[in-house]
Amino acid sequence: MTRRIFLRPDAAEDLRRAVAWYEEEREGLGGELLADLDAAMARIAEAPETFPAVMPPTRRALLTRFPYAVYFRPLGEHLQVLAVFHARRAPAALRSKLR
């Protein structure tokens, strides 16, 4: 069963900032980040239980090309994305997003 995925406002803002940063670096690179994220979201929607639990019930999916992780958890029949987080950011900033 494919589940619907919803981004929390904080996660959407994380993503917006990341896309803007990559676009500043090179035109089109932000779109490539979004494509990588879309592929990860499709994998998450198809089989969320295959991703490692980092703080149960929160799970983590890594992007393939970019150094980002998607942190998500089940919310009823849906999946909620808590954060789209750069791998080199301070872990303390992530913990506050996973509450």
Image: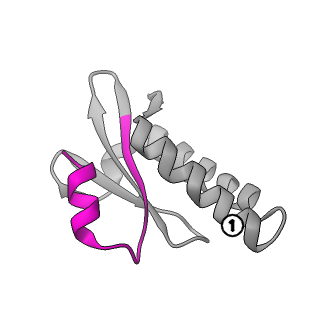
Q: Label 1: which residue?
A: 22
Depicted 21 relative to depicted 81: above or below: below
> Which residue is at the front of the view, 82 or 43?
82
Answer left or right for 63 relative to 70: right
Choose between 4 and 91: the one closer to the eye. 91
- Where residue 23 sits, quadrant-wise, is bottom right
Q: Which quadrant would the N terminus be assigned to in this image?
A: top left
The crowd level at tag 1 (other Cα within 10 Å; few <14, some 14-19, many 20+) is: some
Left/right placement of residue 35 relative to residue 42 reads right
Residue 51: image x %, image y %? Answer: 34, 56
Relative to 80, say whether 63 is above or below. below
Tag count: 1
Q: Secondary structure at mark 1?
A: helix
Q: Residue furthest left?
A: 56
Q: Residue at x 46, y 32 (%)?
A: 5
Q: Quadrant of the C terminus?
A: top left
98 falls in the magenta region: yes
Check residue 51 for magenta coloring.
no
x and y, in percent, of residue 16 in the image: 59, 49
- Depicted 69 relative to depicted 13: above or below: below
Where, by quadrant of the figure, is residue 61 drawn? bottom left
Which residue is pictured at 28% across the width and 60% down the height? 94
Q: Which amino acid does the dot numbered 1 rest on? A: Tyr
Side of 89 where 43 appears, left or right: right
Measuring from the top left, give residue 81's x and y in whole percent: 39, 41
Residues in magenta, as a range = 80-99
